[in-house]
Image (cartoon, coloured by chain):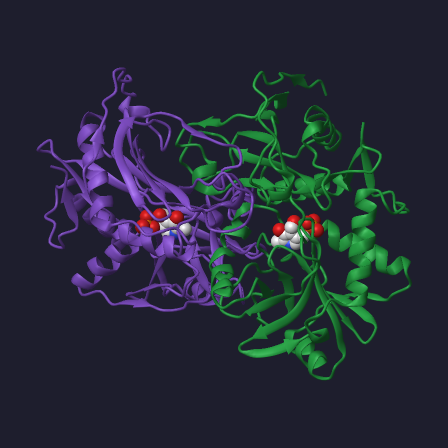
Chain colours: A green, B purple
């Protein structure tokens, strides 16, 4: 793929690396490529970061035909930049696309687009401890048309955001609210796809949890409200009597790249990992018996987020006295180390940029 | 509310009224109003129809926080313009908003915005038989931010589209495919809200039905895949042994304005209407026994869309020999007549523009 490059003539000032937060700042350039029915994806280009100019009838504003991905690039000690398993995000892009009738993207082209954009904006990759460059590919439906059908035109866009350290004050376990009123996804639905629909559906529950003093929600299955699914925008793991359990992929949860990495890592350490259905009852019973040794959420943003407490209809399960567990810590240190190049990448997970 | 008006200096040519189709053409102006946290809705204005200029990080592109409504205005024989039950759409706007964490709009202000915009673009209301002006209010989340949370800023926009006659060749009954693989909505979800998420979730099923030669999908409930919910973007009614049945509102189907109007109309005629759960089994049994006299879908686009056939896992239910039923026809004629001012509006459903 031949990517045209138009460099900015007005580079922005770089933000303070100590106060980046998440998703607030964007780099000098963006990647865009258009899709037209009958013509395929065309006109791949890197241009100065700029607003999109869209007819108000553009389908994405009305019918939610949109998808996104999220991955990170890290500056290593030797000054290089590397990404973590970008091919997994690109594969997932096409899984999402298939479910919501967006044409698939060529995987090699998508990877090339991301690599080239990071190269162009290489100076934007932060290097303060814990910081990284968040990569956000997304696709929107662009027909200016009000009927309900898949669009005939799309834009594939990549933007980059330097993001701050997730854990400034160390890995503090979070308190999680078990959602029993609202449902995020069901079998036959779109829960496994990374599309806006799943996130808008989660907002109200998230706000409710926040008001009650909880940092995130644990979703139960939509059919019986019994089986554990995900925690907010993360997958979830439990360590019960030395064994690790994570909900199996039934079509209603997102197959996380971090989830997959954690499973492989634990297996390489000889720790048994079960992907199976697990009820919230089982979690609370294990907590009561003292068998629930650790619980943590996994995702690109935080890698590992240890869980200190669950609230399930005002019953409280406290985990490891609210302190981070040994295994959670070890998994976090290892994956972050591989991502940042301080631990050898025995899995071939990292992809160098240039 | 004081609406600033900036008129276009370059009015567009009006499209051919015989070939309008649906949602293809837009008028010369649009209404916009902004929301800012702490300030509320502000700066209501009518401006020339123009593209939206939005940062690529704008939340609506990523997390689907968007809602829309759809209603129609009609030219009456005396040259006036009238809308059909706009206050119902505005009430539903706030029901949707509440579910997806969009701040509510003032109902009187929203109505004023719609009325004023139609006044400005009055010449765009078509008058060929069966044509109308489709009114599309919608709200999008506009924070340029990549974290998952409700936006702090929004735009409320109204655009207008002259649309063609739905039934050029008369009311032809449609063939409907009963969806048993994919699910649209479940209790605890967002099925009752008019937000993009529900439409993107339906695309794949809609395409499958089309490929099989069916014009729309009948959705079953997501829990047991047993109870009838909706037909495509319409509500559904069955006439069984002289009684009319429509699925009750359980939170997973959209409470249609047309649905409500049909219920009131039938009741005014002394025809029993039951809002209750109805299984697809019951529908097929009634069809087999010859008890299923009519079936029709209801919605703003077509008012009434008679159903001639259901396909449920390759079992076929044929209705009224594939011909439109007497009651369907009478309901269609009455509601369209009220909308177009040829039948007296005993219900107070119409709202004059000016
Ligand atoms: C709903 C949901 N679940 C799980 C995850 C974790 O996935 P990953 O590890 O690929 O970031 C994410 C975030 O990407 C998500 O949005
Ligand atoms: C999912 C869905 N159901 C039902 C309807 C019918 O509602 P109304 O009669 O208000 O147009 C619509 C269309 O608005 C819809 O989108």
Residue furthest to the bottom: A289
Residue B307, visible in the rendered structure? no
Residue A176 placement (x, y as % from top left): 60, 67
Q: Residue B48 vs residue A149: left or right?
A: left
Q: Nearer the viewer, residue B347 or A337?
A: A337
Q: Residue B47 vs residue A135: left or right?
A: left
The N terminus of chain B sits in image quarter: top left
Residue B142 placement (x, y as % from top left): 44, 40
Residue plotted at (18% across, 65% down): B270
Residue A346, visible in the rendered structure? yes
- Which quarter of the figure has residue B9? top left
In the rendered view, tell whether residue B317 sits above or below residue A173. Answer: above
Residue B199 placement (x, y as % from top left): 47, 46
Q: Residue B338 vs residue A96: left or right?
A: left
In the rendered view, tell whether residue B157 sits above or below residue B222. Answer: above
Q: Nearer the viewer, residue B307 or B102?
A: B102
In the rendered view, tell whether residue B129 sits above or below residue A236. Answer: above
- Which quarter of the figure has residue A112? top right
Total marks placed:
0
- Which quarter of the figure has residue B132? top left
Q: Residue B342 vs residue B43: left or right?
A: left
Residue B128 placement (x, y as % from top left): 21, 28
The C terminus of chain B sits in image quarter: top left
Residue plotted at (49% across, 27% down): A51
């Amino acid at each position: 793929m031949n990517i045209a490059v138009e460099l900015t003539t007005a580079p922005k000032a770089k933000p303070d690396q100590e106060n980046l937060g998440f998703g607030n700042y964007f780099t000098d350039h963006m990647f865009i490529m258009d899709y037209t029915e009958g013509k395929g994806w065309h006109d791949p280009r890197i241009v100065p970061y700029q607003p999109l100019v869209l007819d108000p009838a553009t389908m994405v504003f009305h019918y939610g035909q949109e998808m996104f991905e999220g991955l990170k690039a890290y500056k290593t000690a030797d000054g290089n930049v590397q990404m973590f398993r970008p091919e997994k995000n690109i594969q997932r892009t096409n899984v999402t696309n298939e479910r919501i009738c967006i044409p698939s993207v060529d995987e090699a082209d998508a990877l090339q687009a991301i690599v080239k954009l990071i190269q162009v904006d290489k100076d934007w990759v932060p290097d303060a401890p814990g910081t990284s460059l968040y990569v956000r590919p997304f696709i929107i439906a662009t027909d200016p048309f009000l009927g309900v059908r898949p669009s005939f035109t799309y834009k594939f866009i990549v933007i980059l955001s330097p993001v701050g350290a997730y854990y400034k004050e160390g890995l503090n376990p979070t308190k999680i609210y078990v959602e029993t009123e609202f449902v995020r996804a069901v079998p036959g639905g779109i829960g496994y796809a990374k599309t806006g629909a799943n996130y808008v559906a989660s907002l109200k529950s998230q706000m409710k949890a926040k008001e009650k003093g909880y940092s995130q929600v644990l979703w139960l299955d939509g059919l019986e409200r019994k089986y554990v699914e995900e925690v907010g925008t993360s997958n979830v793991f439990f360590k019960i009597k030395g064994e690790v359990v994570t909900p199996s992929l039934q079509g209603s949860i997102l197959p996380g790249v971090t989830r997959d990495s954690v499973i492989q890592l634990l297996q390489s350490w000889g720790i048994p990992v079960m992907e199976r259905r697990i009820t919230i009852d089982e979690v609370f019973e294990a907590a009561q018996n003292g068998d629930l040794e650790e619980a943590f959420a996994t995702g690109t943003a935080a890698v590992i987020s240890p869980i200190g407490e669950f609230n399930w209809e005002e019953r409280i399960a406290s985990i490891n006295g609210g302190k981070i567990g040994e295994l959670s810590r070890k998994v976090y240190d290892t994956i972050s180390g591989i991502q940042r190049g301080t631990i050898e990448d025995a899995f071939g997970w990292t992809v160098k940029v240039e």
